[in-house]
Structures are given as structure tokens and as C-alpha cells.
Image (cartoon, grey):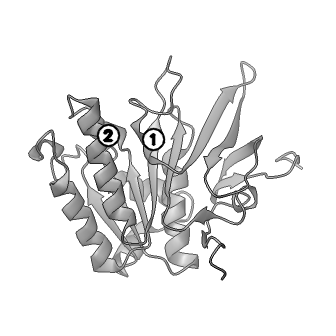
Amino acid sequence: MSDFEIERVSTGIPGLDELIEGGFPRGDIILVAGRPGTGKSILANQFLYKGATEYHEPGVLVTLEEPPHLIRRNMMRFGMDLAALEKKGKLSIVDLSPSKEVTPVKIGEYPSFDLSGLEAIILNHVNKIKAKRVVIDTLAILAYKFRSRDILREEFFKLTASITRTGTTLLLTSEIPAQHDGLGVFDIEAFLASGVLVLYNEMISQQSRSRSIEVLKLRGSKHSSRIHSMRITDEGIRVWPAEISPGA
């Protein structure tokens, strides 16, 4: 590999690598944004699962919204056994969800101006399994704990920089609120990310919707500037890079 060649990390999403020169740049921060129901969490978990099972890259999932038992159940629908990966030490889940069935680390335990406690927890999981991929789903939930946008940006920057400094590739998910033109609740996520994917689930008639994906930006990469068809199949998310109907 030359000094100018960027090492790529396969996304594990069929069709997506073809849009981004073979994968995400290793060690980058990628934002996956979209409105509710667009498939953000599925894509993020598929990135972790395929990384561990096909590319020998263990991963860490930081969940701030959905409890782990529901994530495991939902991903089994696509044939992705996250529990098996946990037992093998190829996946570690950091539970910060409001689940009552487990004892999560409460976000409120951290001072509103400091995420060093969360940083230490995540890095401990990364080091324990020698993770190469990390997902935070969703970073926006933490944003509500901060009173100052400047402090918010500074703390999020320190957190994500500490994670990627280990050599891991970091995916952040962000929900685009209704009646909002940005890519997140506070648009801090887009500031942090070197790459942005936007997922859509648009109504095309009273009876049907159409899913699609757009690579909004990916620094250091030649990427498609078009919006491409996407589906959630029995095996997870799939993207159609060419102008071919998914039904063909």
C-alpha cells in the first residue's frame, strides 16, 4: 500500500462498497442519518456483525436507546446471531439504554460537562476484545444532557477522537426529527463525521413506500452523488448501486 492509498473497511452491506471505492476509510467517523424507520440501526448492526464474521474485525455496540435483548432478537430476524458473537468475544455491547431488565450505566451519572466516564467504559470494551469497529446508536440522546452547544461539541469531539485514536472505525447513528432540515437533533454529529450516509423511506403512493440511500459526503473518497435504491431483505440491508430495479 502506497503512502497515498487509503485503507478501506468493507461495510458488510451488499452494494454499498461499490458506491464508496470499496468501503469506509479505516479509522474514520461515519454518520448514518435518517428519519425513524429508515433502517439506521439495522445498517449499523450489520456493519458490526459482518465485520466480526467475515472480516475478522471484532466490534463494540454502544446502545443508548434500544435494550440489548431487543437488538439481539431483531437482528436474529436477519440471521445475525449477536449473542453467539458475544460469547466468542467478537462483539461487546455497552448498555446505556433505559431498559428495566438489566442494570444499565445511567447517562445521568456523568456530569453534564464531561463524558470522560463514558469514554473510559467504551475504551475498556474496545481494548478487551481488540475491537476494530464501534457503533454508537444514537449519539443524539446524549446531547440533551448538555446545556451549552460549545461544550457539547467539545465533549463529543474528545469522545469520538479517543475512540478512533485506537484505530477503530466509528459509526454514529442520528435520527432526523420531523420538520428539521439538518442531519441530527443538534447537527453536531455531521460536524464530527468525515462521512455521511442518509437513509430515506419515502411514501410513493397510498399503498407503498420506497427505501433509498445517499452518500452525502465521504472525505478522501470518490463516491456516488446519486440516490440509490435500498431494501431491507431477510438477510439485512442491500443496496442497488446501478440503475437496476430491485425486483429485476
Residue 86 numbered mark, or none: none
Residue marked by disc 1:
191
Q: Amino acid at mark 1?
A: Phe
Residue 225 sits in quarter: top right
Measured as percent of width and height from the top left, residue 83 is found at 38, 69
Q: CA distance from mark 2 to mark 1?
A: 8 Å
Instruction: Name the residue located 88 percent from the left edge and 46 percent from the top edge.
Output: 243
Tell me if residue 152 can be seen: yes
Q: Are marks 2 and 1 in contact (CB under 8 Å)?
A: yes
Residue 11 visible? The answer is no
The relative height of residue 148 versus residue 10 in the rendered view (above or below) is: above
Secondary structure of the residue carrying tag 1 is: helix
Question: Which quadrant holds the N terminus?
Answer: bottom right
Q: Between residues 163 and 93, which one lies in front from this camera angle?
A: 163
Residue beneath label 2, please?
A: 153
For marks 2 and 1 on the same chain, the one whose residue lies earlier in the sequence: 2
